[in-house]
């Protein structure tokens, strides 16, 4: 065992102000095993280090390397009167940073797939966003997918972990990436078309490598921005969710009446404001018609198109908390393999570790006792 690791373990023990025997019990070791590990005769296991890190309020990475925990740098992009709370944003991102650190130490991080990148030959950022959307659509037919399907496809085909979780007030979403992970967080909301647009917008920041510092988005929406990276991301989202070919073909089927427009809102799962802006951009409606259509609401379009149940289903899903299945699954597999404790998973899920343990614990022996009932006894097991 590296003597520096042993020294950092001793530092944790000193800070705990316990006897060696008491500390050993705290981390699930016998005093003899702890003494042998501290003298270098026995190696600390990964589980030992995880428990010691918990006891000392530090990380396994610090015990092994002395490196401080990953601290995200924030790049806020605010377009509202209420600025995002940096402390609150940092708190939620650090939960995910800790999970990624554990997976990397356990060699469970996995490899990131190659993804499309901006074409440097295109000087206009809007043109880069359009080209990126074309390449992304080859893997991701976003307009055909409901939002939960779209999230799963983004995770599978681009290696981006997507979570829906509570974010500070005024934050719609954020994106963050390193060499070992790609992450998008979305705020729960009943404005599910905005959440969908935010997902596409943040995906562009990942593909364009804008998110090396955490990009915090406040009220993402189609429109004019001065920040060129935001222009690119908005163009990307519009082209990904509302492809020109499909819209042009739909418009060719007949006049874009209010009824036809309402059906398009349902079909492409976007807000009337975003769709009207896109149709105007494509020259399919004039400015006066755009102004009229933008006044409609997503809910009214669905109700008038006979799709009120779909609207409610999408709204309920957009408001429900969701954690990246790959991230949670690998942490749980590490726990089952004895490589770590449940604490990293509990921290990720923002729940009490004892409650999580009760939820995941094997069935009690009561089930086995029932099988020993005398022949002929009725056993009821709900």
Image (spheres, rainbow, N blue to C red):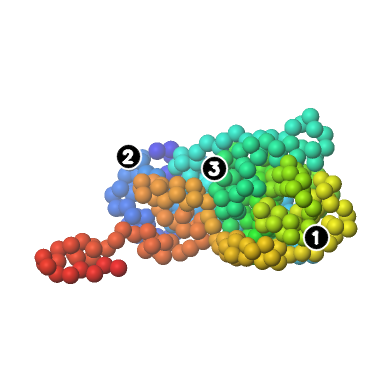
Q: Is residue 211 left or right of residue 382?
A: right
Q: Quadrant of the N terminus?
A: top left
Mark with earlier residue (2, 3): 2
Q: Residue at x 83, y 62 (%)?
A: 292
Q: Quadrant of residue 24?
A: bottom left
**Residue that badge 2 annotates:** 41
Q: Secondary structure at mark 3?
A: helix
Mark with earlier residue (1, 2): 2
Q: Secondary structure at mark 1?
A: helix
Q: Is residue 337 above or below residue 376?
A: above
Q: Nearer the viewer, residue 257 or 280?
A: 257
Q: Position of residue 251 (x, y in %)?
A: 77, 48
Mark 1 closeness class: few <14, some 14–19, many ≥20 residues within 10 Å: many
Q: Residue at x 70, y 40 (%)?
A: 133
**Residue that badge 1 annotates:** 293
Q: Position of residue 346 (x, y in %)?
A: 46, 58
Q: Nearer the viewer, residue 364 or 335?
A: 364
Q: Is residue 175 visible?
A: no
Q: Is residue 367 left or right of residue 361?
A: left
Q: Residues at badges 2 and 3 in contact (C-beta under 8 Å)? A: no
Q: Position of residue 68 (x, y in %)?
A: 57, 47
Q: Position of residue 316 (x, y in %)?
A: 58, 64
Q: Nearer the viewer, residue 125 or 357?
A: 125
Of the two numbered discs 3 and 1 in the rendering, the one whose residue sits closer to the viewer: 1
Between marks 3 and 1, how big is the CA–CA gap? 35 Å
Q: Residue at x 28, y 49 (%)?
A: 32
Mark 2 closeness class: few <14, some 14–19, many ≥20 residues within 10 Å: few
Between marks 2 and 3, how big is the CA–CA gap? 44 Å
Of the two numbered discs 2 and 3 in the rendering, the one whose residue sits closer to the viewer: 3
């Amino acid at each position: 065992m590296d003597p520096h690791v042993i020294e950092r373990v001793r530092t944790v023990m000193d800070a705990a102000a316990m006897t060696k025997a008491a500390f050993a019990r705290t981390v699930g070791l016998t005093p003899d095993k702890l003494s042998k590990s501290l003298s270098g005769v026995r190696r600390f296991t990964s589980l030992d280090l995880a428990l010691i890190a918990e006891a000392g309020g530090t990380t396994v990475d610090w015990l092994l390397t002395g490196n401080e925990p990953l601290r995200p740098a924030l790049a806020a992009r605010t377009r509202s009167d209420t600025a995002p709370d940096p402390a609150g944003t940092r708190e939620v991102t650090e939960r995910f940073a800790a999970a990624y650190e554990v997976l990397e130490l356990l060699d469970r991080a996995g490899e990131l797939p190659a993804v499309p990148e901006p074409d440097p030959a295109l000087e206009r950022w809007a043109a880069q966003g359009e080209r990126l959307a074309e390449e992304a659509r080859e893997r991701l037919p976003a307009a055909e997918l409901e939002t939960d399907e779209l999230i799963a496809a983004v995770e599978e085909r681009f290696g981006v972990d997507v979570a829906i979780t509570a974010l500070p007030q005024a934050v719609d979403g954020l994106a963050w990436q390193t060499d070992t992970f790609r992450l998008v967080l979305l705020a729960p909301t009943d404005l599910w078309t905005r959440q969908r647009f935010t997902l596409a917008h943040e995906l562009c920041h990942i593909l364009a490598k804008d998110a090396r510092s955490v990009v915090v988005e406040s009220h993402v929406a189609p429109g004019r921005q001065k920040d060129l990276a935001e222009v690119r991301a908005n163009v990307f989202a519009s082209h990904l969710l509302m492809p020109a070919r499909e819209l042009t073909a739909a418009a060719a089927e007949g006049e874009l009446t209010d009824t036809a427009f309402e059906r398009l809102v349902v079909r492409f799962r976007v807000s009337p404001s975003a769709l009207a802006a896109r149709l105007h951009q494509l020259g399919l409606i004039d400015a006066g018609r755009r102004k009229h259509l933008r006044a409609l609401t997503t809910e009214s379009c669905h109700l008038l198109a006979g799709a009120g149940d779909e609207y409610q289903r999408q709204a309920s899903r957009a408001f429900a908390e969701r954690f990246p299945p790959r991230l949670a699954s690998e942490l749980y597999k590490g726990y089952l393999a004895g490589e770590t404790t449940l604490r990293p998973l509990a921290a990720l899920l923002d729940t009490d570790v004892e409650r999580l343990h009760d939820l995941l614990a094997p069935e009690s022996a009561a089930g086995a006792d029932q099988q020993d009932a005398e022949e002929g006894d009725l056993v009821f097991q709900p």
